[in-house]
Amino acid sequence: MPRRPQQDRAPSQVDVARAAGVSTQTVSRVVSGQSNVRPETARRVMAAVDEVGYRLHAAAASLATGRTRTIGVIFVSTARYSTSAILLGIEAVAAEEGYAVTTASVAHRAGPAAFIGAFDRLERQGAEGIVILAPVGYLAETLGSRTERTPTVGHRQTDGSGPDALVDQRAIARVATEHLLDLGHRSVWHVSGDEFWQESNARREEWEDVLRERGLTPPPVIPGDWSPESGYRAGRTIAAIPDATAVFVASDEMAFGVIRALHEAGRTVPDDVSVVSVDDIALAAYAAPALTTVRQPFEDEGRASATRVIEMIEKREPVAAEPLRPELIVRASSAPPRPA
């Protein structure tokens, strides 16, 4: 086992080299951001850096190499669980590859100028590549040449095309809606996410398509904005519709509000109304009743985004990744309709 350096001096590159089983020249190349080191060797060196407590002088390395080894992330400032989970995945891959992560948030429902400003801020901070956690339709056109000079990965494309496509948002709506119809419900209502987001529109369109394939006319969409409060308002609406026996809710947080409103109105879940939602956040299994939901692998999505942007930065041949598939988690909030 490699010995840790004596406590009366700061760890050096010699200590890192000894711990990693490489030369000090290799350590120097890795910590200064040079690319002529095999990825597995670089990861071993960075693990040794953490092990011995060697302090990287990022500013000096940046001046010497012209590189910052930093990934920028733009996200919309909301309380959604998904954003923090995706960031965990991005940070995990960045650490493995010897990159730092810097972030810039934009306000909910921000216009194109806000995204341009966030992108420019990250570039000024030295981001070598940028991941955008905001599936809104106008970004590619708005950012224009910026994405040509700085490698950019758009997160959660909804049309299933291109290297950035991760989870098929239409498949999420299909599996949720078909589950409820297969249980015997004659129709399925839908509480949508914020229309500002492409994923909301993709899920709504697929919900409509599934109903029409079964010969059913889609009922009116009940709008939401991802928050439990909007779910509660939607639940009050559903509670006032006597023949509503099933609802597909676009997020777990909104589903909590829907179930609360139905309970207050004297309609039980799932005996009177079945509820299926999306995300499978940690609290979903502990709702009352436990939520049937479509799981999204958020951390895996973050890892895939970070891997792709680093491949672009390093000009590596992209590694073909398996599509991340949504998974229906059946719990207690969905059941066949009560017999007439």
Image (cartoon, rainbow, N blue to C red):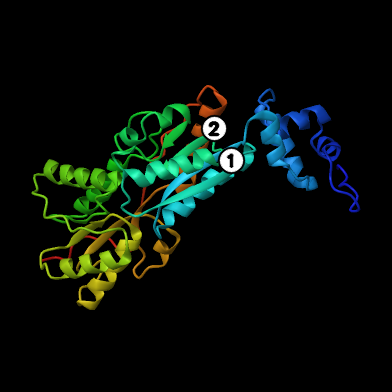
- Secondary structure of the residue carrying numbered label 1: helix
Q: Nearer the viewer, residue 137 or 111?
A: 111
Image quarter of residue 35: top right
Q: At 34% across and 44% down in the image, what residue appears?
A: 113
- Secondary structure of the residue carrying numbered label 2: helix
Q: Is residue 250 left or right of residue 312?
A: left
Q: Quadrant of the C terminus?
A: bottom left
Residue 326 picture location, percent across and down:
37, 44
Residue 183 seen in the figure:
yes
Q: Nearer the viewer, residue 2 or 31?
A: 31
Three-letter code, disc 1: Ala
Three-letter code, disc 2: Ile
What residue would you read off at disc 2?
Answer: 310
Q: Quadrant of the N terminus?
A: top right
Q: Is residue 3 left or right of residue 44?
A: right
Q: Is residue 35 above or below residue 247?
A: above
Q: Nearer the viewer, residue 78 or 280?
A: 78
Residue 85 picture location, percent across and down:
48, 52
How busy is the neighbourhood of tag 2: few (under 14 within 10 Å), some, or many (20 plus)?
A: many
The mark total stands at 2
Image quarter of residue 247: bottom left
Asked if the residue at tag 1 contacts the one at tag 2, i.e. Cβ–Cβ closer than 8 Å, the answer is yes
How busy is the neighbourhood of tag 1: few (under 14 within 10 Å), some, or many (20 plus)?
A: many
Q: Is residue 276 above or below residue 260?
A: above
Task: For marks 2 and 1, give the CA distance.
Answer: 8 Å
What residue would you read off at disc 1?
Answer: 94
Residue 304 seen in the figure:
no
Q: Nearer the viewer, residue 11 or 171?
A: 11
Residue 41 picture location, percent across and down:
71, 30
Image quarter of residue 162: top left
Q: At 32% across and 66% down in the image, what residue appears?
A: 228
